[in-house]
Amino acid sequence: MMRIISVLLAAVLALPLAAQTNDELVTSFVLDNGMQVVVVEDHRAPVVQHMVWYRAGSADEPKGSSGVAHFLEHLLFKATDTLASGELSATVAANGGRDNAFTSYDYTAYFQRIAADRLELMMRMEADRMTNIRLTERDIVTERQVIIEERNQRTENNPRSLFNEQMNATMYLNHRYGTPIIGWMHEMETLDMDDALGFYGTYYAPNNAILVVSGDVDPAEVRRLAEQYYGAIPANPALPERLRTEEPPHRAARRLVFADARVAQPYVSRSYLAPERDPGDQEKAASLVLLAEVLGGGTTSFLAEKLQFDTQVAVYTGAFYNGTALDDTTFDMVVVPAAGVTLEQAEAAMDAAVAEFIETGVEPEQLDRIKMQLRASEIYARDDVDRIANRYGRALASGLTVADVQDWPRVLQEVTGDDIVAAARAVIRPEASVTGWLMQAEEAIQ
Amino acid sequence: MIRPFVSLFALLMLALPAWAEVRIQEVTSPQGITAWLVEDHSIPFTALEIRFRGGTSVDPADSRGAVHLMTALLEEGAGDMDARAFARAAETLAARFGFDASDDEVSISAQMLTENRDNALALLKQAIHAPRFDPDAIERVRRQVLSGLASDANNPNDIARNVFSRLAFGDHPYGAPGEGSIESVSALSRDDLLTAHRGTFARDRLYVGAVGDITPAELGLLIDDLLADLPQTGAPIPGPAEVLLSGGVTVVDFETPQSVAIFGHAGIPQDHPDFFAAFVLNQVLGGGSFESRLMTEVREKRGLTYGVYSYLAPKDLGALYLGSVASANGRIAEAISVIRDEWRRAAEEGVSDAELRDAKTYLTGAYPLRFDGNARIANIMVAMQMQGLPIDYIATRNARVDAVTADDVRRVAASLLDPAGLRFVVVGQPEGLPVATE
């Protein structure tokens, strides 16, 4: 008995001080019109990041208008009633700040990073473009060319992006996560003023938005300014409930081969349909986060051990899971075979390793190391509160609550080795999988 | 309605914010190593940045890629630990180590919790002093490097970069990728790696920055323990790289829908008296913002690209002025023509007073926003030391930007910008450009 206790004690002593959380940095509240606000304080430098997240992303687009969420994001930098086209960004720059925006499946977000005493100016302009954009036909035509070149750059010119697009489209039978965020080219080419304004009118409203302010700010002052600028905008009573077409049961393993002359390094990719984090119910997702780490999180992971060290089947292996999503997400694995190893052999080795992992379970020391790193990451995170802010924005826009975000580090720490194996058994279902081979074009002819 | 709003902004713009002073201390260790330190005990960790001048450029001509492969192997086994034991040890401490080799330097970035800093440093010391270069680790990492090189050879961005470098610098080490070639990396021996290790880690080329939960006395002892035993001198660093570029277009035929272009000509060294004028000029012409002339003309007005940029690239041994753009094969010729026109307009006319003012406000206002984290500040401090800047530079830097006049910019634009000497390397299947010469 004594021996066990002393081992436990040693393990506890090795923990950093920070089983502590960073919750004390965070204040949150809701404006009368329904706009949610999160403030993350860091007073080391007089800098602020001001973000507005809309609960509207590419998965909320009407059928046939893929890419409109992202197109609209671009168009929000054009004119409003009071700002000329480009003036918002020019004003941010003239004040020494930088601004940008991004669109994902579940959200669209706009941000500025600037000296802390310019927060009011940022709110005034961001609140303005929430409801007052004024687009011209010329904006539509020119900016549509820009997003087409963006798709060329990100996707058409990159066989790995094209391959990922095919993987997603094959995974989702009925959900919009199967459609690329940037849109299908043939639909992007038809996007027009009505598409953009339709999406804008439906989703851009304070009751569908989250304000996240991080840096050298006083939460009471943020509240005062937020009430003044965002609080003045009426809620949209017609905001639709966020319901999307759901996946039916998956019943058949799917396979695809994507061949492209530009591929230099073939690889095999495997995706399984996986549950996401849900409000008050994050345990399964937490187990999958740790499964991805244990299985494919780097040099000491199980796949690396089996495929890169014990054997030299692969030059690279990895497992990935991002549970912050509104609907069912994916658990993914990638194996890049060594020279002379076929994709078939690489895939077989991957499957054998995963089967062996489920049999042998999690090495306790490995789990301890991962949890130690997760705890330490909360300390390192305080050096970059903008990332903490992004964490809140992404989670709240994906259907989670402030409490879920604050519970998350604890939920991760409570995952056991048995939970991880159970999560693996649940998610590794061939009938809910897509296997893809990315190949050089000439190989595929055989 | 637009005007009143604008004038309100103009008022706000006059007063730039006060910002926290970055208090840098110079620490000299008992054994004579100098480091710059920003003490900040608010978070219990320290960021440490260590750089060795020379980088991949010190590779001998017959073993290109040795420094890069050596650097990649530092965390793949050291002392009595093999690669996996080393990784497990780092994970146990939640220490974060990064090892990187570029043309001009090898850098080691470490973030360590205060509670186990000594153990983390002991581990890092092994990686620097006693990497094992085990044969199986060499082969494993070599395969990864070769896989990356094979991918680069089929990536239009990498092809453009590599062809441009070769045209710009020829046989100088800057003329070829620091990762080496498939042939050179395949041929590297363990001895080549040992030679690269000896040539890289020496005190005559060492720069150190630290930020975080550590005192000057602690830092002095730490860097002595970590670095004082290194040899005094390392491998010779090559001489200056002559810029060999001439004006024109080089097309590399590559079947892909969007052409990728890199363009540029000779640049201006960082220690040149006109560097700040050139820096302000570039901000107006093609610096990162949406408001630059290139972004306005190529993207905002014509929708020819998602992004077009220009940037000064002053390296230790040679300076370039570079830019990049990507447009569909059918539209790249127009993008290139617009860029040439803008280059010529800036060379002939300089910039307007309003553009000068906006660029200066942006650059001076954005500067303090860079100091936004321990690791970033450590990086900036080491770069300052390598450039020979004084320790009080941060406090004087904005005054140097503000001192640039419209006349300065006109003079520098006329001498630096060379529209006829601009070389474009285009990878893709561009329409309406001269026949491929590559």
Image (cartoon, grey):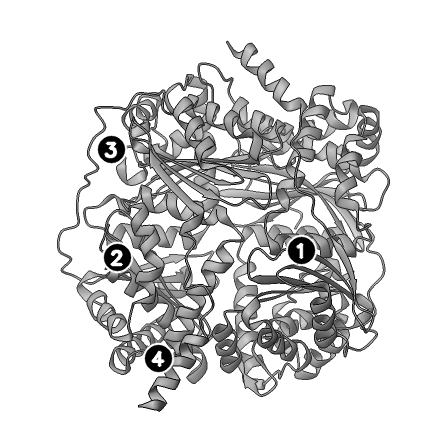
- Label 4 environment density (alpha carbons within 10 Å; few <14, some 14–19, many ≥20): few
- Label 2 environment density (alpha carbons within 10 Å; few <14, some 14–19, many ≥20): many
Q: What's under tag 1, amino acid-wise? A: Asn
Q: What's under tag 3, amino acid-wise? A: Pro
State the residue at coordinates (62%, 84%).
B132
Q: Which element carries disc 2, helix, strand or loop?
A: loop
- Label 1 environment density (alpha carbons within 10 Å; few <14, some 14–19, many ≥20): many
Residue A69 appears in which quarter of the rendering?
Answer: top left
Q: CA distance from mark 2 to mark 4?
A: 22 Å
Judging depth in this view, the residue of A254 and B361 nearest the camera is: B361
Q: CA distance from mark 2 to mark 3?
A: 30 Å
Q: Which residue is mark 1?
A: B379
State the residue at coordinates (33%, 61%).
A410
Q: CA distance from mark 2 to mark 1?
A: 38 Å
Marks 3 & 4, CB-CB < 8 Å contact: no
Q: Is residue B198 left or right of residue A95?
A: right
As drawn, the label of residue A62 is 3
Q: Nearer the viewer, mark 2 or mark 3?
A: 2
How many callouts does the rendering have? 4
Q: Which residue is mark 4?
A: A364
The numbered mark, 2 or 3, whose residue comes first in the sequence reads 3
Q: What's under tag 2, amino acid-wise? A: Gln
Marks 1 & 4, CB-CB < 8 Å contact: no
Q: Is residue B396 left or right of residue B76?
A: right
Q: Which residue is mark 2?
A: A282
